[in-house]
Image (cartoon, rainbow, N blue to C red):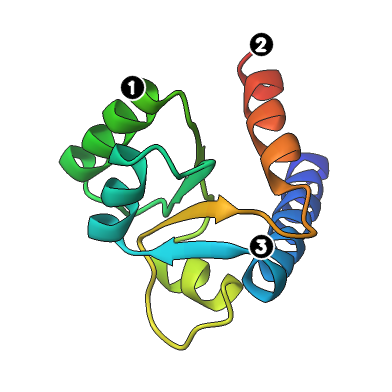
């Protein structure tokens, strides 16, 4: 029960940071535009929904590795990610090119590395 409470709080902080990026930063929604921003080296962080198909997920991770860009695996599905972005449609993948006022790029990759250690 404690772990789920901690996970819920982390998800809320991700959602609030994501909302700040949507308001003040620059981003691209979708796999095609995310891959394009990765190829051009503009993406700072890529966020993937939990139900992204494995082949697509590995392709994006590979491009991100080549571009030395962080990848965050969002714990919710694509409907939840779309809602967190403030959209009324599903979002499977999003890349952040300019975080704006948010500290999402500093906070997310660090959390992921700490969870794996």
> Residue 97's spot in the image, x, y percent?
52, 52
> Residue 44's spot in the image, x, y percent?
54, 41
Residue farthest toward the bottom in the current orientation of the protein: 88
> Residue 114's spot in the image, x, y percent?
71, 20
Residue depicted at x 39% and y 27%: 67
Q: Which mark is residue 18?
A: 3
Q: Of callouts 3 and 2, which one flags the residue occurring earlier in the amino acid sequence? A: 3
Q: Of callouts 3 and 1, which one flags the residue occurring earlier in the amino acid sequence? A: 3
Residue farthest toward the top in the current orientation of the protein: 117
Name the front one of labels 3 and 2: 3
31 displayed left or right of 94: left
Label 3 secondary element: helix
User: In what quadrant of the picture does the C terminus appear?
Assistant: top right
96 displayed left or right of 6: left
Q: Which residue is mark 1?
A: 66
Whether 43 is drawn above or below 62: the answer is: below
Q: Of callouts 2 and 1, which one flags the residue occurring earlier in the amino acid sequence? A: 1
Name the front one of labels 3 and 1: 1
Which of the 4 quarters of the picture holds residue 83?
Answer: bottom right
> Residue 47's spot in the image, x, y percent?
48, 49
Residue depicted at x 53% and y 42%: 45
- The answer to whether mark 3 and mark 2 are in CB contact below 8 A is no
């Amino acid at each position: 029960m404690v772990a789920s409470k901690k996970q819920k709080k982390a998800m809320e902080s991700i959602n609030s940071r994501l909302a700040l990026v949507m308001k003040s930063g620059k981003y691209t929604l979708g796999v095609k535009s995310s891959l394009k921003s990765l190829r051009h080296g503009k993406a700072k962080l890529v966020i993937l929904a939990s139900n992204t198909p494995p082949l697509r997920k590995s392709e994006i991770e590979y491009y991100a590795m080549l571009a030395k860009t962080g990848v965050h695996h969002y714990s919710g599905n694509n409907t939840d990610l779309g809602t967190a972005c403030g959209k009324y449609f599903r979002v499977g993948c999003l890349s952040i090119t300019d975080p704006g006022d948010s500290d999402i790029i500093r906070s997310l990759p660090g959390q992921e590395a700490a969870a794996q250690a």
